[in-house]
């Protein structure tokens, strides 16, 4: 039996039994594209005190903030320096093109919460980025509780000029876990933001970010998050492994024996279970995390990302399974 010719999954031309981001890009833009990550000067309401202090327990940026201090939301008060952001974009392209022959790019507003600013600033920033050369799409990473109706209108207007994707961090649908990780929003708030964005900006592609291996969660809890996500039917999803990096609250928990990272085999099972539950046409942007080896404390097996992905492929093949096999519409 060949892993490619006998692959029952329809959105694939390789051995992958899930809808890869690479497949999506090639079929949408006709060739490979690369995301260029940008830091547009934002902070986060979970760091500066609007929703919480200190950030999510695994967030290095949040942990670096002194507890109790209210940070000025830079993006609310300063005019955007679009030239500096453009320079980041050009530098990112130069780096990518040293390794790959790519000509189309997706400016990716990644750092912190990229709609946490005034509507006027957001509009100016997005207008500027939409003019970047060879940009085929704009990707905005944000929290679902930072999507006021006026901002959704701005994103909707942008999506009529250039394809737009919005990446929303959920991490878990379990409110108890959300409290443990200091997420500072509930699942209901997430769902509300997601649905208002879907209705208010129908052409925008919405991605959801979830994390496996959160403190206290079992494989059943992780399946339950996948079921909740499947009901929302996002356009894409990123599945991450929770890893421990030095200097975070999570690192202190790990060192005190209050947190045990996920075992490799459990992670492979969890991801395959979740893929089976997700809609077949939801693009899978990621299946692991990407910690820098120099600051990673655990689990060390996560460094060998390709081997983890290969074992996910093998497990799906062994199960004779694929993305969406257990999806209930
Ligand atoms: S929402 Fe994102 S930026 Fe904000 S604290 Fe959590 S991980 Fe950090």
Image: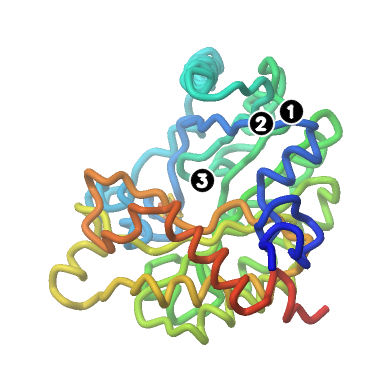
Q: Nearer the viewer, mark 3 or mark 1?
A: 1
Q: Is mark 3 within 8 Å of ligand 1?
A: yes
Relative to residue 72, is residue 296 drawn left or right? left
Residue highlighted by disc 2: 33
Q: Which mark is residue 113?
A: 3
Residue at left offset 53%, top offset 66%: 312
Residue 87 location (% of width, % of height): 50, 14
Residue highlighted by disc 1: 136
Q: How many marks?
A: 3
Q: Quadrant of residue 26?
A: top right
Which corner quadrant holds the C terminus? bottom right
Q: Under tag 3, what secondary structure?
A: loop
Q: Residues within 10 Å of mark 3 (few under 14, many from 20)?
A: many
Which corner quadrant holds the N terminus? bottom right
Q: Image height check: is 77 above or below 51?
A: above
Residue at left offset 78%, top offset 67%: 8
Residue 165 location (% of width, % of height): 70, 44
Residue at left offset 27%, top offset 47%: 65
Q: Under tag 2, what secondary structure?
A: strand
Residue most extreme to the front: 1
Mark sitting earlier along the chain (2/3): 2
How far apart, in angstroms, are the residues tagged by discs 2 and 3? 24 Å
- Residue 145 in view in this figure: no
């Amino acid at each position: 039996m060949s892993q490619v010719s006998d692959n029952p999954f329809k959105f694939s031309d390789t051995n992958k039994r899930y809808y890869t981001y690479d497949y999506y890009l090639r079929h949408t833009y006709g060739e490979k594209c690369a995301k260029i990550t940008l830091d547009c000067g934002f902070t986060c309401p979970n760091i500066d005190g609007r929703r919480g202090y200190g950030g999510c327990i695994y967030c290095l940026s949040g942990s670096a903030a002194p507890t109790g201090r209210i940070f000025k939301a830079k993006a609310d008060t300063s005019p955007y320096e679009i030239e500096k952001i453009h320079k980041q974009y050009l530098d990112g392209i130069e780096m990518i093109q040293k390794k790959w022959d790519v000509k189309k790019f997706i400016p990716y507003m990644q750092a912190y919460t990229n709609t946490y600013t005034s509507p006027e600033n957001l509009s100016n920033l997005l207008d500027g980025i939409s003019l970047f050369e060879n940009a085929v799409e704009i990707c905005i990473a944000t929290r679902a509780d930072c999507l006021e109706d006026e901002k959704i209108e701005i994103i909707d207007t942008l999506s009529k000029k250039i394809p737009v994707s919005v990446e929303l961090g959920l991490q878990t649908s379990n409110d108890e876990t959300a409290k443990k990780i200091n997420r500072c929003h509930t699942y209901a708030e997430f769902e509300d933001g997601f649905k208002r964005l879907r209705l208010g900006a129908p052409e925008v592609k919405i991605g959801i970010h979830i994390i496996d291996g959160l403190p206290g969660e079992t494989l059943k809890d992780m399946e339950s998050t996948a079921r909740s996500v499947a009901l929302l039917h996002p356009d894409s999803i990123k599945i991450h492994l929770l890893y421990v990096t030095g200097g975070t609250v999570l690192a202190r928990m790990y060192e005190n024996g209050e947190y045990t990272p996920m075992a490799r085999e459990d992670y492979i099972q969890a991801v395959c279970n979740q893929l089976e539950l997700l809609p077949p046409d939801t693009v899978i942007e990621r299946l692991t995390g990407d910690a820098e080896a120099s600051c990673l404390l655990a689990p060390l097996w996560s460094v060998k990302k390709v081997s983890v992905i290969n074992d996910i492929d093998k497990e799906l093949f062994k199960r004779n399974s694929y993305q969406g096999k257990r999806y209930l519409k």
